[in-house]
Amino acid sequence: MALYTDQSAVTVTVPATSANLGPGFDCLGLALDLRNTLTLTASEFILFEEQETAYTVTINGVDAAKVPADRTNLALEAAEVVFRLTGRRPAAAELRVHNCIPVGSGLGSSSSAIVGGLVAANALVNGGLSDQALLRLAVEMEGHPDNVAPALLGGLVLGVLPDAESGPEQLVVRRMPPPRLMAVVVMPDFLFLTAEARAVLPRQVSRADAIFNTSRLGLLLHALLINDFSCLRVAMGDRLHQTQRLGIIPGAAAAYDAAYAAGALGVALSGAGPSLIAFTDGDGDLIATAMLDAFAAAGLSGRSWLLRPTADGASLTLINESAGTHSNG
């Protein structure tokens, strides 16, 4: 039984993100002005239990061949979560993705798909889910908030997971304005699986290392919020994950040092890697070249981007034949 039959389409653009930023392991992320665009189109809507949605998937753009063009596409998996919650779904739908965020880069490709799918599906079926509800679903899918929160909300975002022992089971998210800096991102041509990146992490850390990271995270938030970049190199230090991961990415440690030598104010792995992110208020091209040269010396080619941190998160455009076009940033 169809719920309604007006053809509808929604387009969502979602920014790339860089997580951790050194000491903010699994809790801090920043939106960057590189965006994936996802369009979901349907012509008839039915009750969720009636049948599965027949999907058609088209992917183009950067790393398009690496993105699944079937039901295993992460954006469709996210959409299905919304359809299940709302009790309705399209009988058939077309997903078109223009990919600009490289896959497996440490720039939040999976988070962009999750957020894009959730936002698009919620709009398509008039689900009425709030940003907080969508964020909670995204965190459940991704496992932590550091990428999905800035992908949805934009800006610099601190996310704290629920802890039933110390308080209410509620995700705490605080969004802050992005820093006034250029982000230089360099991605080596190196396959670095998330499971491998997690496997090298220690099961326990010393008290000294815990103090090191908590003090740096506090200093980093201070530096980014008031745009005091004189302490950024100290603030982006880390002892929880970065040293271990830099050590197994060929050329990464040398590229990290090369970025500072070329004038970067702060450098970190972007997410789990293999990309590095360097912040500058000067010549970003010089820093990118220095990092690329370091990876080349280790036998790896690479790609680079000069990106601005952005306050804009996921942006929605709803198109309906009978109602025209409506945009909601």
Image (cartoon, grey):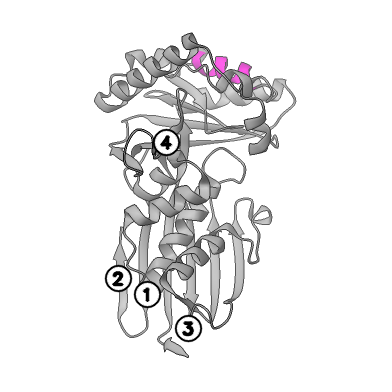
In magenta stretch: residue 204: no
At 33% across and 52% down in the image, what residue appears?
Answer: 132
Say few, some or many: other residues with alpha carbon within 10 Å of mark 1 (under 14 / 14 to 19 / 20 or more): some
Q: Amino acid at mark 2?
A: His
Residue hosting label 4 = 29
Residue type at mark 3?
Answer: Ile
Mark 1 or 4: the one toward you:
4
Q: CA distance from mark 1 to mark 4?
A: 31 Å
* Residue that carries the numbered disc 1 in the rendered image: 319
Q: Is residue 33 left or right of residue 75?
A: left
Look at 47% across and 41% down and name the residue there: 144
Image mark for residue 159: none
Could you say which quadrant of the image residue 85 lies in?
bottom left
2 and 3 marks in contact (CB < 8 Å): no
| Mark 2 to mark 3 CA distance (whole Å) | 23 Å
For label 3, the SS is strand
Q: Residue furthest left?
A: 226
Q: Does the residue at mark 1 contact the one at mark 2 (Cβ under 8 Å)?
A: yes
Magenta extent: 252-260
Contact check, label 1 and label 4, Cβ < 8 Å: no
Image position, residue 257 (x, y; %): 56, 14
Q: What residue is pinned by disc 2?
A: 326
Question: Which of labels 3 and 1 is toward the front?
Answer: 3
Residue 109 lies, in percent from the top left, at 54, 47
Residue at the spot of label 3: 46
